[in-house]
Amino acid sequence: MEPVQRADESRHRLGKGVFARDVSKLVPQDYSAMFLRPFERAFRQQNYRRDRSPGEWSGGHGTAEEIHFARDACLGARVGDAIASAQEELVHGYTYSGHPVACAVALKNLEILKRDRIVERVKKTIGRYFQRRVHETFADHPLIGEVRGVGMLAAMELVQDKKDRRGFPRPGLVGTICRDHCFANGLVMRAIRDTMVLAPPLIITEKQIDQLLQKARTCIDLTAKDLGIR
């Protein structure tokens, strides 16, 4: 759908069925039949115009023609008509969900996870190492009230009072400060209000975990310094 929607605001000029034919080379035949042929039919039935300015197609602000095209291609009349008549914005953020290329990649990803026994590795070795090192790195930090996690997911809760685990009066402010330090130091660590979350890739190594946690500790230290917490 991206070349049709022009979500990247590039100027695509596609003939009928061109996108479908190109993508069909990348995906299994059953997925091609499921996802691509309805689009080709919709192009023929609606004689859909692709000569608008870039970015006009939007999931939240589609024209009547665009909504009916999406209905015929993807949704069916019952769901499509409900969306078209709702008189409100269609809020969504799943750009590639159901996309045939994304489906093909997902299948290959599952194949690799099974072939290389990645999930087993997380359960037996690298996940345990990650959890141990996270607790060793942050359990004694004066800004962190709780360290929790499972597998390759860890969260460090930033608090005003470590002993009582009392949070800050403006939830999210300190988390944003810490997040900005992360960005400035080349680290992606998500702030969910005042909880900092790490979710490294399943294929990470022990050496990379140590590097990751050292950088995360630095960013939380900088946040504590900004707050005058020692």
Image (cartoon, grey):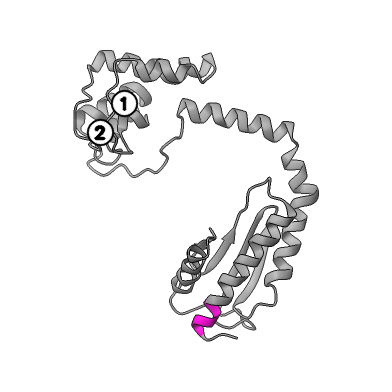
Q: Is residue 55 left or right of residue 194?
A: left
Are discs 2 and 1 less than 8 Å apart at CB? yes
Please determine whether, in this image, residue 14 is positioned above or below residue 223: above
Where is residue 136, by image quadrant? bottom right
Q: Is residue 207 above or below residue 31?
A: below
Q: Few, some or many C-alpha atoms within 10 Å of disc 1 (few <14, some 14-19, many ≥20)? A: many
From the top left corner, tell me how far across and down residue 197 is, in percent.
57, 61
Q: Is residue 139 magenta?
A: no
User: Disc 2 to disc 1, how far (Cα)?
Assistant: 9 Å
Question: Over which residues does the magenta segment extend?
Answer: 223-227
| Quadrant holding the N terminus | top left
Q: Main secondary structure of the magenta part?
A: helix
Question: Viewed as shown, does residue 18 lie left or right of 32?
Answer: left
Task: Answer above or below: position of 43 versus 61.
Answer: above
Quadrant (top left, top right, bottom left, bottom right) of the C terminus: bottom right
At x 65%, y 66%, the residue is 214
Q: Which x, y percent locates residue 195?
A: 55, 67
Q: Is residue 126 above or below residue 14?
A: below
Q: Position of residue 82 (x, y in %)?
A: 29, 33
Mark number, residue 85:
none
Instruction: Indicate the amino acid at tag 2.
Output: Ala
Q: Residue at x 67, y 46 (%)?
A: 202
Type of amino acid at the residue the image marks with label 1: Arg
Residue at label 2? 84
- Near-viewer residue (159 or 108): 108
Measured as percent of width and height from the top left, residue 206 is found at 74, 55
Residue indicated by mark 1: 71
Please indicate whether residue 94 sits to the left or right of residue 166 in the image. Answer: left
